[in-house]
Image (tube, helix red, strand yellow):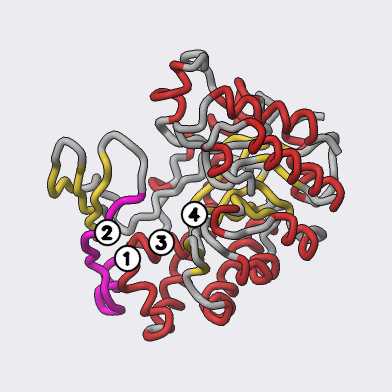
Amino acid sequence: MTSSDRIKLLLRRELPDRMGLFEHLWSETIPDCWINEGYPEGADPHDYFGYDMQGAGGWLDTTPFRIEPELVEETEEWRVTRDGRGAVLKHWKDKSGTPQHLDFEVKDPESWKKYKEPLLATDPERLFVDQARQELEKVRAAGRFAFMGNTILVEQLRGMLGDLVWLPSLLLEPEWIHDFNRTYTDFYKRHYALLFAEAGLPDGIFLYDDLGFSNGPFFSPAVMQGLFLPYFREIVGFFHDYGLPVILHTCGDVRPLVPYIVEAGFDCLQPLEAKAGNDMLAFAREFGDRLTFMGNMDIIVWNTNDRARIREEVVGKLEAIKRLGAAYIFHSDHSVPPDVRLATYEYALELYREHGTY
């Protein structure tokens, strides 16, 4: 059985020989730390660790104005730029992290009109067709499940309006949010239809849309149902019409929203942040016949580099998910930072290989 076959079965809630394997790593983890701990220089982690999945393009340019970010300010540690969404953001120069929001040009329905207009046209330059075609061929040649990915609605709202505007607007300007979501839903459908026609179909789709923070969702189930569920359902249905399973990455505590994620038709939920209160086993008991799970291995436990604690975390969850008969892909509950030692991560993979068979 190839890695691709394994993931396809899991995303249909069918149990193959073993659970799937995938991971996201912080950009610093290998070059700044693991390379000094025995990781082979130049090795691809998909090959080295034996991941079953790999990204293969699909990152459309979703900015209304396709421009290079304008440099506003720079220090030894920071860069402040204004991007094609009209957002002024402050980024670390030498390490990962969420940018600081400084300003946003789009503040109301009137200022949105300028940024909406470019999104109404289909622009082949947004697709990066040659790159997608080449990456699809590369991943398929390795026998892995090839997915295309992109952010979708909430990430677009946050990126263009900022938290101080989009969150109140959910209640104060719902028609504007509907118009925004309608515009981007149509944008994605048009551009992915063209990309698939030009580059070919992947094996699946990985959509990224953070719906919560550590203490709960960004919005209520009622807002989810009224302002987002119809568009999520339409986007997922579009990909399903191509025969493509859809994975949703969403950070934070999303427990109240999981029924709507299932209702929208998503096939897999990731990363199931344990540190935000998500319990994969509780989800599996209720939704295991309709949803595949990826993640939930508590990175705070992995950060301790304490093998006894890591064994308890990994083995306990793997054995429980097997008893429930749920489809699962082994992954941290977000991504692996540099303070997780290479030997620690390799130990977690040993436990997965020992206990991750069905």
Marks 3,2: beta carbons within 8 A: no
Q: Residue at x 58, y 67 (%)?
A: 232
Q: CA distance from mark 4 to mark 1?
A: 25 Å
Q: Identify the residue at the far bottom of this view.
A: 172
From the image, tell me which residue sits under label 2. Answer: 101
| Above or below, 137 relative to 75 | above
Q: Residue at x 56, y 39 (%)?
A: 199
**Direction from residue 255 to residue 326 in the image, left or right:** right
Residue 130 showing in the rendered view: no
From the image, tell me which residue sits under label 4. Answer: 191
Q: Earlier in the sequence, mark 4 or mark 2?
A: 2
The magenta segment is: 98-115
From the image, tell me which residue sits under label 3. Answer: 156
Can you give x and y, in whole percent of width and height, for residue 182 in the image? 48, 72
Name the residue nearer the viewer: 69 or 342: 342
Marks 2,1: beta carbons within 8 A: yes
* Dot 3 amino acid type: Gln
